[in-house]
Image (cartoon, grey):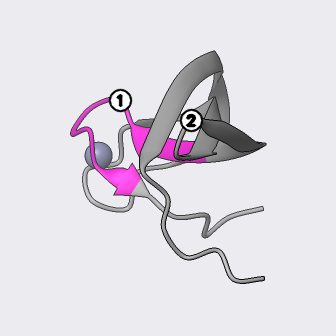
Amino acid sequence: MRLSYVCERQQKELRRQQAPGSCPYCGGKVEAMDVEVQSKLCFLPMCFQIKRRYFCTHCSKRLEILFE
Ligand SMILES: [Zn+2]
């Protein structure tokens, strides 16, 4: 069985929190946001994933995890 086409994606913000480290572009504060991503395959809910995204609160750049 091959699943290749996902027609709809929904995102729900779960929580935000201050993350350690600072933005490499402007030195601003970094926030971590947990989002719940729901992938649907044509009306059939497929899976829920929790993803953590980092972004700068000052310049709004999306950041990848470079610090731990
Ligand atoms: Zn920044």
Can residue 20 be seen by looking at this rendering? no
Which label was assigned to residue 6? none
Quadrant housing the C terminus: bottom right
Pick whichever of labels 1 and 2 is earlier in the sequence. Answer: 2
Label 2, ligand 1: CB separation under 8 Å: no
Tell me which amino acid carries mark 2. Phe
Please determine whether, in this image, residue 4 is positioned above or below residue 31. below
Place of residue 16 in the rendered image (x, y in percent of width and height, measured from the top left): 61, 19
| Nearer to us in this view, 46 or 11 | 46
Label 1, ligand 1: CB separation under 8 Å: yes
Instruction: Give the residue drawn at x 68%, y 64%.
Output: 67
Can residue 47 be seen by looking at this rendering? yes
Tell me which amino acid carries mark 1. Thr
Q: Which residue is mark 2?
A: 43
Which label was assigned to residue 57? 1
| Residues at discs 1 and 2 in contact (Cβ within 8 Å) | no
Label 1 packing within 10 angstroms: few (<14), some (14-19), many (20+): some
Label 2 packing within 10 angstroms: few (<14), some (14-19), many (20+): few
Place of residue 21 in the rendered image (x, y in percent of width and height, measured from the top left): 60, 48
Please determine whether, in this image, residue 60 is positioned above or below residue 65. above
Place of residue 43 in the rendered image (x, y in percent of width and height, measured from the top left): 56, 35
Please count the marks in the image: 2
Q: Is residue 57 magenta?
A: yes
The picture quadrant where one finds residue 49 is top right
SS label for mark 1 = loop
Is 39 placed left or right of 22 in the picture?
A: right
Instruction: Give the residue drawn at x 48%, y 68%.
Output: 5
Is 36 placed left or right of 55 in the picture?
A: right
- The stretch of residues the image draws in magenta is 53-62
SS label for mark 2 = loop
Quadrant housing the N terminus: bottom right
